[in-house]
């Protein structure tokens, strides 16, 4: 018993160290037992300062519209400057790029127009969104550099996910089936099977920039010109952290409620 717990603590300590303390206790107590033979762990950490930082003195409490009938207060940051921006008319969605220092990475924010019904406003956007469409929309050639008034909430998100049902639905249920799992490429025997896949993430956005971390453990259109230069994220939106040279998406998330 002590050996399993010692292993769990060592793994959690490794993840915590590599994410600067942002991801703690990735593996819960009791997850490892006498049947555990292998733990696969992946961790990523990112901290970036805005190329054009928000002025903390301009940050003020503002209402954030969760749905048509409900709001909650947030600390809203404000910045007026030139940013890349575009509008997807088919989906009535504004897209804004906020670059980090060095311009190697950017945060991309997809903001649907104001909520008109009882939904968050993200449902249609998420149904239509694919990686190919996203890359097309945020292509520099599709965006215009324009002076814009940006209002963005200061926020922090921490989430835990059980990826077992998701991975099963995506086409790999056999990996979790004792009678069907085949990890012969990793083990000479046929005794390995996945029992858990857990994922934990952390994202914080403030006036200075963004801090993000994630860890996973597997236990075996139409384009329109902008009319009004305002980008007011006072209702639910999607965000992505992109590596600009490769167009790779490093992190993604949704902010729906403070």
Image: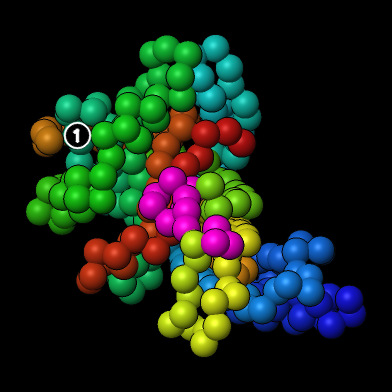
Q: Which residue is mark 1?
A: 88
Q: Residue at x 71, y 66 (%)?
A: 27
**Residue 5 appears left or right of 238:** right
Q: Please tell me whether residue 64 belongs to the stretch shown in magenta.
A: no
Q: Residue at x 49, y 62 (%)?
A: 180
Q: Quadrant of the N terminus?
A: bottom right
Rendered view: 212 above or below 44: above
Q: Which residues are magenta?
A: 166-179
Residue 147: give x, y in percent of width and height.
25, 45
Residue 61: give x, y in percent of width and height.
61, 34
What is the quadrant of residue 247 in the picture? bottom left
Rendered view: 114 above or below 54: above
Number of marks in picture: 1
What is the quadrant of residue 2 in the picture? bottom right
Q: Quadrant of the C terminus?
A: top right
Among all residues in the image, which is located at the extreme front? 179
Rendered view: 121 above or below 102: above
Q: Residue at x 60, y 39 (%)?
A: 75
Among all residues in the image, which is located at the extreme bottom? 188
Q: Residue at x 46, y 24 (%)?
A: 120
Q: In this orientation, does residue 4 appear?
A: yes
What is the quadrant of residue 231 in the picture? top left
Mark 1 crowdedness (10 Å alpha carbons): few <14, some 14-19, many ≥20: some
From the viewer's side, name the closer residue of 41 and 90: 41
Q: In the structure shown, which secondary structural element does the residue marked by tag 1 occupy? A: strand
Q: In this orientation, does residue 41 appear?
A: no
């Amino acid at each position: 018993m002590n050996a399993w717990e010692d292993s769990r603590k060592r793994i959690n300590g490794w993840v915590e160290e590599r994410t600067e303390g942002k991801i703690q206790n990735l593996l819960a107590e009791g997850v490892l037992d006498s049947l555990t033979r292998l733990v696969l762990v992946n961790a990523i950490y990112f901290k970036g300062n805005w190329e054009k930082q928000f002025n903390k003195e301009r940050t003020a409490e503002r209402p954030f519209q969760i749905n048509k009938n409900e709001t909650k207060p947030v600390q809203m940051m404000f910045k007026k400057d030139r940013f890349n921006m575009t509008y997807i008319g088919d989906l009535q969605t504004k897209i804004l790029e906020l670059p980090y220092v060095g311009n190697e990475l950017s945060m991309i924010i997809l903001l649907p127009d104001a909520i008109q019904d009882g939904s968050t406003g993200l449902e249609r956007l998420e149904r239509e969104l694919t990686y190919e469409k996203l890359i097309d929309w945020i292509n520099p050639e599709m965006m215009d550099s324009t002076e814009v008034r940006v209002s963005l909430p200061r926020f922090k998100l921490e989430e835990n996910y059980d990826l077992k049902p998701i991975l099963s639905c995506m086409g790999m249920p056999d990996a979790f089936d004792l009678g069907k799992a085949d990890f012969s490429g990793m083990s000479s025997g046929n005794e390995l099977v996945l029992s858990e896949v857990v994922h934990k993430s952390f994202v914080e956005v403030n006036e200075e920039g963004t801090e993000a971390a994630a860890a996973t453990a597997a236990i075996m259109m139409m384009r329109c010109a902008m009319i009004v230069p305002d980008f007011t994220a006072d209702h639910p939106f999607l965000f992505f952290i992109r590596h600009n040279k490769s167009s790779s998406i490093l992190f993604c998330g949704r902010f729906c409620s403070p």
